[in-house]
Amino acid sequence: MIHEFRPLQIAIVFSLSIGVASAQLAKPPIALHAALVASPAAAQQEGGTAGTLSVEMLTAARNGDVAAVKQLLAKGEDVNAANPDGVTALMIAGAEDHLNVVLVLLEAGADARLKTASGKTAAVFATGRGYAEVAAVLNDAASKPPVAPAAKPAPAQTPPPADPANGNASLEATMQFIQEQLNGNTTSFTLYIHNNISGADQRIEIRFQYADFVADPVACRITGLSNFSASHQVPSQLQRRHQVNLREVQSISVIPWAEAVVKDNSLTERTDPPVFVLVVRFSNNEEKFTFPDKSKADAVAKATNRAVDLCRGRN
């Protein structure tokens, strides 16, 4: 008996045949993408935090974008970040046959032993899709602890900019700074003196003004003038020449006025406002410079110490 197929039957048989052939040629389906779809919120975490797979890393691993993966890792993304179902970038890269991405992730410390909630490793996904080479790499990686990621190099330490006030400038710049700080430095204050024996009090208006200071880096010397005036003395103004040979300096300090001036224990002195004195000591004498501000006096003292060290180094 000869059977004849009607047109409709022929179409059905043809469609079924094509469907069977397609099913045989296609890679075995895996649960990876289903896991991602099951947790769309996890897959959409922008800029992944530690432990959370970001959409950027997911996309880079799926597309085999080695440069993007490296960039995300360099920014600090967790190489073992996963979505709530346990899917990691390594699993995605393995399932898509992106060997280069797999190697980058493993080198960065990705753990091939991690499993999804259903118990699948990255090697299982690669094997399930027939990617033998990637699966072999992942199976080997899963047989041992993950590679410790290379320590990030410490950021280069940028030296602070040269600043005489910080004591790190050249001799020329340092001495120029000292010269500028002394020239035009004016200290005006009221001095109160109390005689502890007689009980007498005295009030004196005092003014120091410094001018014509010249710093000579070659000779390592600073010279200049100070004008001193006091309301109780005649003549009311005196001028004094200062000379600081930096190679002969023994010590430098900044102290309150009373500590620098008072020699008589029977007297008590105070100033209004507070006055500070930069004392530069030599073997047999000392030079003193008054400042109305301690921070300024400290800056000049620090610069002078720097200049002393540099000058001695030139001997």
Image (cartoon, helix red, strand yellow):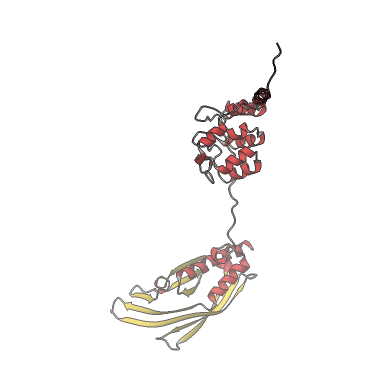
User: Which one is in front, 178 or 10?
Assistant: 10
User: Which one is in front, 298 or 150?
Assistant: 150
The x and y percentages for residue 161 are 59, 62
Above or below residue 259? Residue 4 is above
User: Which one is in front, 183 or 86?
Assistant: 86
User: Which one is in front, 177 or 224?
Assistant: 177
Above or below residue 16? Residue 275 is below
Q: Point out the image quarter for the N terminus.
A: top right
Query: Taking 93 as reference, is 299 left or right?
Result: left
The residue lying furthest to the top in this view is 1
The x and y percentages for residue 289 are 49, 74
The x and y percentages for residue 21 are 67, 24
The residue lying furthest to the bottom in this view is 235
Tell me where residue 199 sits by quadrant.
bottom left
The x and y percentages for residue 241 are 54, 79
Above or below residue 28? Residue 177 is below
* Viewer can see residue 71: yes
Q: Point out the image quarter for the C terminus.
A: bottom right
* Viewer can see residue 140: no
Q: Residue at x 59, y 55 (%)?
A: 158
Q: In the rendered picture of this protein, how many numbered marks are placed on residues?
A: 0
